[in-house]
Image (spheres, grey):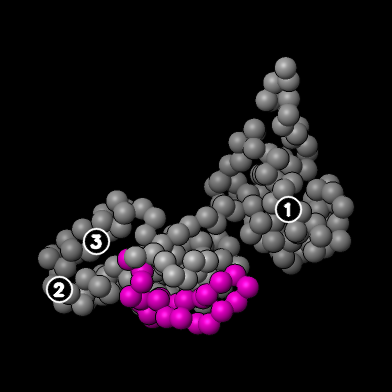
């Protein structure tokens, strides 16, 4: 029986360079048993640039003076999986911290920094949460700054436009904040009203 480790492709010098770039730019490490993900994730980059192998990509990367290739590599390798109201515990912790600021400094508008925001669902979840809390209990909605190393992700976060693959059953907590934006091949799109409280940079 062939061991599972033998089924994994060996890490090449090109893979090591690309994994090192990801770690240097973002702090994320790709485990040795997941180096197959590098080639899979970068296939669209190879096709877009007319390159055949990761070695070709690294050669172009080393010659690139604009940074556009390294940006494309980082965008492709980042795990941008996210969703609305994904981590209830984290949202509650932020809400508690904002409440503490309100008690300590009445009238002061809290500021929240959402780092590694991906395409924006998590900071928008905060914006929706505080919009609802303000509506029900009064007070000031916090300012939310969302940042990410991926420029492509930030552009999507600024648009705050999301596909609802099952338009009949959107996320319950987000339902009142979704504005229908028509149909597309990805399904009905929606923009949370609370997006007005979010700046992405």
Image point (64%, 33%), residue name: 32
Element under label 3? Answer: helix
- In terms of depth relative to the viewer, which is nearer, 192 or 102? 192
Report the disc number at residue 95: 3
Contact between marks 2 and 1 (CB within 8 A): the answer is: no
Sort mark 1 into few (<14), some (14-19) or many (20+) by Cα contacts within 10 Å: many
Contact between marks 1 and 3 (CB within 8 A): the answer is: no
Instruction: Quarter of the image for the N terminus: give it.
Output: top right
Magenta stretch, residue numbers: 173-196
The verdict on residue 178 being magenta is yes
The image quarter containing residue 44 is bottom right
Image point (29%, 67%), residue name: 129
Image point (34%, 65%), residue name: 172
In x, y percent, where is residue 16? Answer: 72, 40
Q: Total label count? A: 3
- In terms of depth relative to the viewer, which is nearer, 43 or 16? 43
Q: Earlier in the sequence, mark 1 or mark 3?
A: 1
Residue 184 appears in view: yes
- In terms of depth relative to the viewer, which is nearer, 10 or 188? 188
- In terms of depth relative to the viewer, which is nearer, 108 or 51? 51
Residue at which label 1 appears: 42
In x, y percent, where is residue 84? Answer: 41, 62
Image point (54%, 47%), residue name: 27
Residue at which label 2 appears: 137
Element under label 2? Answer: helix
Q: CA distance from mark 1 to mark 3?
A: 38 Å
Q: CA distance from mark 2 to mark 1?
A: 48 Å
Contact between marks 3 and 2 (CB within 8 A): the answer is: no
Q: Earlier in the sequence, mark 3 or mark 2?
A: 3
Element under label 1? Answer: helix
Taking the image as shown, residue 69 lies to the left or right of residue 158, namely right
């Amino acid at each position: 029986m062939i061991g599972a480790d033998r089924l994994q492709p060996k890490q090449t010098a090109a893979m090591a360079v690309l994994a090192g770039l990801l770690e240097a730019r973002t702090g994320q490490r790709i485990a040795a048993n997941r180096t197959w993900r590098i080639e899979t994730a970068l296939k669209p980059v190879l096709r877009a640039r007319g390159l055949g192998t990761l070695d070709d990509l690294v050669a172009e990367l080393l010659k690139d003076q604009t940074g556009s290739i390294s940006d494309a590599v980082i965008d492709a390798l980042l795990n941008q999986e996210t969703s609305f109201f994904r981590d209830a515990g984290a949202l509650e912790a932020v809400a508690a911290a904002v409440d503490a600021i309100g008690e300590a400094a009445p009238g002061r508008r809290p500021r929240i920094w959402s780092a590694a925001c991906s395409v924006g669902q998590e900071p928008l979840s905060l914006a929706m949460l505080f919009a609802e809390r303000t509506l029900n209990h009064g007070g000031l909605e916090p300012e939310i700054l969302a940042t990410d190393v991926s420029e492509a992700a930030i552009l999507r976060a600024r648009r705050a436009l999301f596909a609802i693959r099952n338009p009949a059953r959107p996320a319950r907590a987000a339902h009142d904040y979704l504005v229908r934006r028509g149909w597309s091949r990805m399904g009905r799109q929606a923009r949370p009203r609370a997006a007005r409280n979010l700046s992405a940079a």
